[in-house]
Image (tube, rainbow, N blue to C red):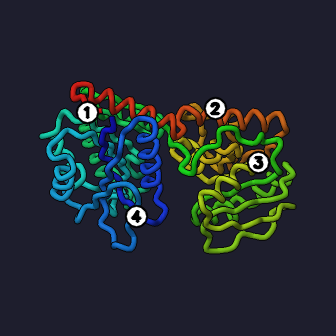
Amino acid sequence: MTTRLIQIVPRRSISPEGVGDYARLLAEQLLRDHAIRTVFVSGSPLPPHERLRDEWETHELAERTSAALRATLDGITGGAPVPILLHLSGYGYQDKGTPLWLATGLERWRRSHAAAPFVTIFHELFATGPIWGSAFWLGPIQAWVARRIQRLSTAGIATTGPYAALLEGWRGERPGSTIALPVFSTIGDIENPIPAVERRASLAIFGRAGIYDAVYRERITQIEAFVIANKIDEIIDIGHRTEAPPPMIGAARVRSVGKASTTVLREELGSARFGLLDYDADRLAKSTIFAAYCAHGAVPICLSDAAGQNDGLRPGKTYLKLAADDATPVVDDAALEALQHGAKNWYQPHSLKSSADVIGRLLRQSSATTGRI
């Protein structure tokens, strides 16, 4: 018997959208493995030409207000306690990352639907920054919104262990559960990736335009040293760039792929020996690019000065970390094999299939008294 689930997302757009893509893939897996069919609620009114139209029933809010949210949910459920899976990323629902309307609307809905399972995936909690930046002033309000929603949820899912610990503290004595579940690859997984030692000595650099300065300007000398030391002969640059990468780094030719389809991405990452990203190593568990490298067998290399030992990750065991003052690592065949296996083994418990199993279980546990899932 197929049951219904409402997934609330920031937007469903034809443009690439991290949280939206994550939710769509999760919907596909929940239907395939658990007979749970998603109805989407999009929290962003979009022009008609930007709306994603696919096989999934989608209700777009006419405006970002608590009244519009409540009316949309009531229209879908008809008063029945249908489970909700909320994807919380504050900036997706409000330009300053403080969607008070979302918290208020959910509080009002919960008053009359207290028996319905309500699981929240906290993709972000709140921003931080120096006193002269907006994040310093907005962060406490963002945290207040997240705290309100956590206390409404029958279960909370954080993408990193430190996030989960904070959420658990916010829950206090209220009933419910909080778990850490690192993100899965939004371009799919490879069950049996090509061994790293059998791959061409290549390095993939995958990311949005903002990665350019870190990779090709600020850390170019360090990357060149790594390329030379590990005899890399090709660099595959993947993603939108406003400026062309250099044609060569060390002895490696740089091949620009640009924005690529999922098929091309999977082919490139499934054959690259290494995959480079610029990211806070303490939060790697929430990076879909890091997950994509792990899932496709490309040994991840993270440019970061952070310790990078959260969520079971260990530099030199599950990935390589290059801090600004690190010596250049030389990776032999044995180390390559160990790193690839370490990254893949770390990733498996929260692959797309594993994540859908965890979320399906949380929905069932939350609905033990309703019989709805």
Residue 31 versus residue 122: which sits nearer the camera? 31
User: Disc 4 to disc 1, how far (Cα)?
Assistant: 29 Å
Give the residue type at disc 4. Leu
Give the residue type at disc 3. Arg
**Label 4: element kind:** loop
Residue 112 versus residue 373: which sits nearer the camera? 373
- The answer to whether residue 28 is above or below residue 94 is above
Residue at figure coordinates x 27%, y 46% from the top left: 144
Which residue is denoted by mark 4 in the rendering?
52
User: Disc 3 to disc 2, how far (Cα)?
Assistant: 17 Å
- The answer to whether residue 180 is above or below residue 130 is above
Residue at figure coordinates x 83%, y 51% from the top left: 201
Give the residue type at disc 1. Arg
Residue positioned most to the front: 1
Locate residue 305, reporting x and y percent. Answer: 62, 46
User: Disc 2 to disc 4, how far (Cα)?
Assistant: 34 Å
Task: Return the disc, 1 or 2, that comes first in the chain's sequence.
Answer: 2
Which residue is denoted by mark 2 in the rendering?
345
User: Disc 3 to disc 1, how far (Cα)?
Assistant: 46 Å
Residue 268 versus residue 79: which sits nearer the camera? 79
Locate residue 307, reporting x and y percent. Answer: 60, 39
Which residue is denoted by mark 3 in the rendering?
273
Pair 2/4: label in front: 4
Pair 3/1: label in front: 1
